[in-house]
């Protein structure tokens, strides 16, 4: 596990993250963004198999369903009780839910392999300001605000859409609640309905 932050593109906006098992990564992200260090952050995985290494997910959430879900610019909130092993306290900050994302791209795999762990993921911006969408804005933010050990992922493998993401909370009984409605929320809702068939 390394104490280091990464700045990288996601399917929606530019993001910032680091190994979830290093508390200072969580603290430094809060410092960079100007937000509370007690705020839980989402976790990014490199593929569905990687996600399953850390969570026991209900049988209905098969690989095909999950793959399609995560291709819609979404995050899935799952009960921390689904985790195979307890996470450090700073990961969920007392919340009973932890949000997860999967981005199956070579640069994501490389980041996660370097971190030797899943990484936190949150938008690259100062709190209260719009998230970085353009490459040039992300690079300028990195140059201006990242004073600790960090890597800017210079890649064209993924270009952020600039569209808002949808966040879905899954309860232990497989009921769902959309906590943030993104630009593709209608598609997401239709996909969720498949769980009930």
Image: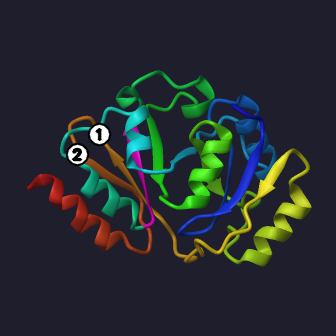
Which class describes the residues within 10 Å of circle 1: few (<14), some (14-19), or many (20+)? few
Question: Given the current orientation, which residue lies at the most extreme left position?
Answer: 197
Identify the residue under disc 1: 171
Q: What residue lies at 59% left-to-right and 36% top-to-bottom?
A: 117
Front residue of 190/160: it is: 160
Compared across the picture, whether 99 is left or right of 108 comes to left
Disc 2, SS: loop
Identify the residue under disc 2: 175
Which class describes the residues within 10 Å of circle 2: few (<14), some (14-19), or many (20+)? few
In the image, residue 75 lies in the stretch drawn in magenta: yes
Residue 42 position in % (x across, y down):
54, 46
Residue 172 position in % (x across, y down):
26, 35
Predominant secondary structure in magenta?
strand
Disc 1, SS: loop
Examine the image and state in which quarter residue 180 appears: bottom left
Is residue 43 shown above or below 164?
Answer: above
| Quadrant where the image shows the N terminus | top right
Distance from disc 2 to disc 1, alpha carbons, whole Å, reads 5 Å
- Would you say the residues marked 2 and 1 are in contact, meaning their CB atoms lie under 8 Å apart? yes
In the image, residue 9 lies in the stretch drawn in magenta: no
Is residue 65 shown above or below 86?
Answer: below
Residue 84 position in % (x across, y down):
39, 25
Q: What residue lies at 31% left-to-right and 63% top-to-bottom?
A: 68
Q: What residue lies at 40% left-to-right and 29% top-to-bottom?
A: 83
Q: Which residues are magenta?
A: 73-79
| Quadrant where the image shows the C terminus | bottom left
Compared across the picture, whether 127 is left or right of 40 comes to right
Q: What residue lies at 52% left-to-right and 75% top-to-bottom?
A: 163
Residue 161 position in % (x across, y down):
55, 77
Can residue 19 be seen? Answer: no
Examine the image and state in which quarter residue 21 appears: top right
Can residue 42 be seen? Answer: yes
């Amino acid at each position: 596990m390394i104490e280091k932050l990464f700045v990288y593109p996601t399917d929606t906006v530019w993001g910032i993250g680091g190994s979830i098992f290093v508390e200072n990564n969580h603290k430094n992200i809060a410092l960079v963004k100007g937000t509370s260090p007690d705020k839980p952050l989402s976790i990014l995985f490199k593929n569905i198999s990687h996600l399953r290494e850390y969570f026991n997910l209900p049988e209905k959430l098969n690989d095909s369903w999950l793959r399609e879900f995560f291709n819609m610019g979404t995050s899935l909130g799952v009960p921390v009780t689904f985790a195979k092993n307890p996470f450090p306290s700073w990961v969920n900050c007392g919340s009973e839910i932890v949000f997860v994302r999967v981005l199956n791209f070579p640069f994501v795999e490389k980041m996660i392999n370097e971190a030797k762990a899943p990484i936190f993921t949150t938008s690259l911006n100062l709190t209260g300001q719009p998230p970085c969408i353009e490459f040039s804005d992300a690079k300028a933010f990195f140059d201006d605000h990242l004073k600790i050990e960090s890597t800017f992922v210079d890649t064209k493998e993924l270009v952020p859409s600039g569209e808002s993401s949808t966040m879905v909370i899954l309860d232990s009984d497989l009921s769902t609640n959309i906590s943030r409605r993104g630009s593709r929320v209608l598609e997401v809702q239709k996909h969720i309905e498949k769980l009930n068939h």
